[in-house]
Image: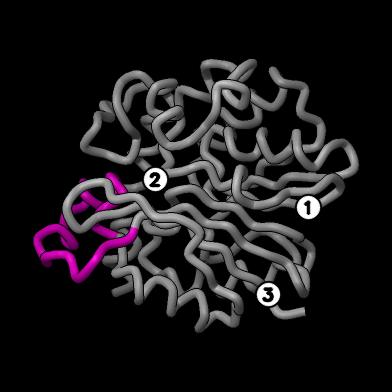
Amino acid sequence: MAKKNEKIKQHVKKHYAELAKGTSCCDVSTCCGPSSRTSYAKMIDYSDEELKGLPDSVIGTVAGCGNPTALAGLREGEVVLDLGSGGGIDAFLAAKKVGSKGKVIGVDMTEEMIQLAKKNAEKMKADNVEFRLGELENLPVEDGTVDVIVSNCVINLSPDKDKVFSEAFRVLKPGGRMLISDIVTKGELPSEIRENLEMWAACVAGALDEKVYLQKIMNAGFEKVEVVAKNYFMGMVLSLKVRAYKPS
């Protein structure tokens, strides 16, 4: 199992490294969206006001399935952690909301994405944003130091979601909250899809049944687990927005 999981992880990492370098051939069949990234960003609920002023190098790597920062209720001064931060769009939007007294940490396992996000931060003079190379299953973040966790179409890419949610719980402060936008399914995917590495990179093969996904969040210790919104993508595949809290 460990060998299989590592194979999946390396394939996903390669896919998103290519996206960071602008050499990925994403299309509407993947979670990267259509060729027009701005159109895709608007389709998944980013507003014109939010996209205004963002460099092309930020919008060009939008690969999510929602806009978690719009639903997270971010407040000035909060510390936010973005799981799978990519080129940084959610981190930068969060940074505007928490202000100079707050802080945003973006974690991504793809070195090319971290390098791109850091360059984007320099372009935007985003002094309250920090990007760290690391895996969601082993977050480079101290215990109980984060007020809010956001994540956008990334946890489905992990072959060990129990560990991801356990790590998220660990780094949150008591009473902290998590707002995730992710891909789930209604029912079990066929084995031929589950075993397809390309479908893993496309945010499909790693998607769990909605009930299983929510149970894993609860198993990690979260409470008040609530589905905020859901939108069907195709067939049995849907985008789910979930809010959950770490007990005080």
- Say which of marks 3 and 2 sits in front: 3
Name the residue carrying label 3.
Answer: 246
In this view, the residue in front, 170 or 228, is: 228
Q: Amino acid at mark 2?
A: Lys
Q: Position of residue 149 (x, y in %)?
A: 64, 57
For disc 3, the neighbor class at 10 Å (few under 14, some 14 to 19, many from 20) is: many
Residue range (magenta):
184-206
Comes first in the chain, label 1 or label 2: 2
Q: Is residue 143 visible?
A: no
Q: For the point 54% across and 52% down, which residue is it?
A: 151
Here the colouring is one colour
Q: Secondary structure at mark 1?
A: strand
Label annotation for residue 13: 2
Do the numbered discs 1 and 2 sit on residues whose CB atoms are within 8 Å?
no
171 sits left or right of 137 in the view: right
- Say which of marks 1 and 2 sits in front: 1
85 sits left or right of 240 in the view: right
Q: Secondary structure at mark 2?
A: helix
Q: Amino acid at mark 3?
A: Lys
Q: Secondary structure at mark 3?
A: loop
Which of the 4 image quadrants contains residue 209?
bottom left
Q: Is residue 205 magenta?
A: yes
Name the residue carrying label 1.
Answer: 79
Q: For the point 45% across and 28% down, which residue is it?
A: 42
Quarter in which the C terminus is drawn: bottom right
Do the numbered discs 3 and 1 sit on residues whose CB atoms are within 8 Å?
no
Q: Is residue 217 magenta?
A: no
Q: Is residue 147 visible?
A: yes
For disc 1, the neighbor class at 10 Å (few under 14, some 14 to 19, many from 20) is: many
68 sits left or right of 26 in the view: right
